[in-house]
Amino acid sequence: MKVEKVEFDPISRIIGHINAISVGVKQAIKPERITVEYPRERRKLPDNFRGLILFEKDRCISCFRCAFICPANAIQMELYDNYYPSIDYSKCILCHFCVDSCPTTALKQTKIHDVAFRDLEEMVVHTDEMINPPELVREDTVTVEYKINRELILERKKEVENLIVEVKPVERIEYHSACINPQNCIGCALCASVCPADAISVEINEKKVLSIDINKCTGCGLCVRECPTNTLGLVKR
Amino acid sequence: MLGISEIFEMFKNNMVNIPLIQPIIDALMNIPLVNYVVALVLWKPFFAIAILPGLGGIMLVLLLMVYWERKLTARIQWRVGPLEVFRPLRGLIQPMADGFRYFFQEVIVHVDAHRPYFVQLPILTFIPVLLPILFIPAGEIVAIRSPYAIQIIVALIALIPITIIGIGWASNSRFAYIGSVREAMMYFAYEVPFVIAVLAMILMYGSGDPYVIVEKQSVPGIIMNPIAFLVFFIATLMATSRLPFEIPEADQEIAFGPFVEYSGILFGIVMTLAYEKLYIMCLLMSILFFGGWSGFAIPLLGDLSPVIWLFVKAVVVMLIVALTRSIYPRFRLDQALRMGWTSMLAVSLVSLAVALAIRLSGWLG
């Protein structure tokens, strides 16, 4: 097949030139750029932005759900007076599955996305470092909001945005662990060994006695998860 | 033999008259020794070369043009452009900072370069760049008054590519070589239509004397002969390596072409070459097509008023020329050559015919 010369008619060429120049002039007068001059301006972020994760110790029931769900295996539970999560930010992909899975909102999202670490060791953020937000140097005086209404419009406001999101504790149904199928129990005592609150005790004499201290039980469900014979279950308080 | 007093008298009799600062000048003229300097600076031929529209104008235009070009291109491309050097004015002194950087950077003359020419030619380039200014008048302020000024300016502008080719040759590097060959090719492409367009205007006005040309432009030349303006405009873009024809310098292909080996202040000098050429050609353009220095006189500025008009017209043209950089992509060398030798040549001949028709109709007398 022969390649033929492309023909243009002069009128469409002139129209093309005029279009190009008019677009250029239009952008020169009122550019549609979406640049945010970052250290001095900040883009307004939504409250559910997946930034740095903070931790509130009082709400945590040591249910390990964050550690179980973490797809990057970044969360390790550390032992203080109880088991609390620590996050390795060298592994963390900021998916916030942990925040979503937390039944008591002990893990909280923030809008902080500009954090610097000196080395890899420092990137393992222990529980006590997660309680208080990191030290921030704020240069910004203007907050830029992206408003999308068919076109993207940048709205600049002279205000400083609070990067810490106030997370209200959820109203949740209180559970406690209980023997729902006592005939299944084989006395393996896995539930007792796994309980972070020491609420379960197993005595094996002639009879297998599994006692649950309801006052100590936080309803984390770890024992239910571990039980191999479906003996235990969560019931409402 | 002329004594100092005779020269001083010569300066004093031909001084720029600016009513706005006349009291200051009078006071300075009474101080011994300082009065010689003041008389020299305000001597009309010296003023034309050294201040406006000469060297001072070039410096101003360089600072303005580099900033404007970067900022305008950035705006059109949705960027911000130079900003961090003096933020309150949004990076206005960025070109000055760049200039300082060039000053203190090491000048490297590489082993393969032809050392004398490599160092000399960037400086020698100033000769064809600055000589046309001698012949560009602005009202009363003129260095050399000649009835063939336009022709001389065009002839001197035609010398600039030769020095650029010399720079490319002296650099002795492959990119510089490609760049200087491209420069030579582009020179072929634009020079003939450019000269014909200027000739058309000279034919139309019946003289190469800028004074006659400005006097005859009761209607600006661009309206009388827009075709010649089109050719002149495109030739200006080609001659100054503006973007649709930025072929000799093509950053992305041959890394600034003939100037690739330069660094430090020598690079600063060669980089500004295209801007200086653009300034000269815009001055010529405003004389030929935009009525030169004609404009309502500002009484406070006196003799300075026509100079300001000419300068402002040239600068406005330059600012508009800068727009093409962000709109058009680069032509290929053969496309530009074809354009120069077919459509542009034909259009310039048409403009010559238009000029002849106007001349024969006796409109301009």
Image (cartoon, coloured by chain):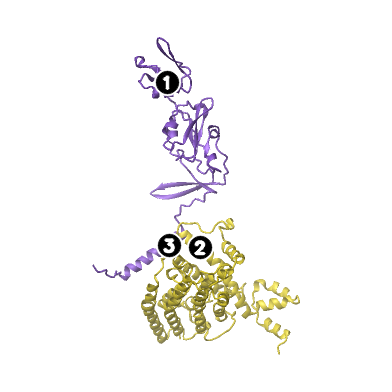
Of A68 and B334, which appears nearest the observer? A68
Q: Which chain is yellow?
A: B
At 65% across and 82% down in the image, what residue appears? B14
> In x, y percent, where is residue A229?
35, 20
Q: Is residue A133 visible?
A: yes
- Mark 2 element type: helix
The residue singled out by tag 3 in the image is A24
- Answer with mark 3 or mark 1, whichever residue precedes in sequence: 3
Q: Which mark is residue B244?
A: none
C-alpha distance separating marks 1 and 2:
70 Å
The residue singled out by tag 2 in the image is B70
Q: Chain of mark 2?
A: B
| Colour used to depict chain A in the structure image | purple
Q: Amino acid at mark 1?
A: Cys
Q: Residues within 10 Å of mark 1 (few under 14, many from 20)?
A: many
The residue singled out by tag 1 in the image is A191
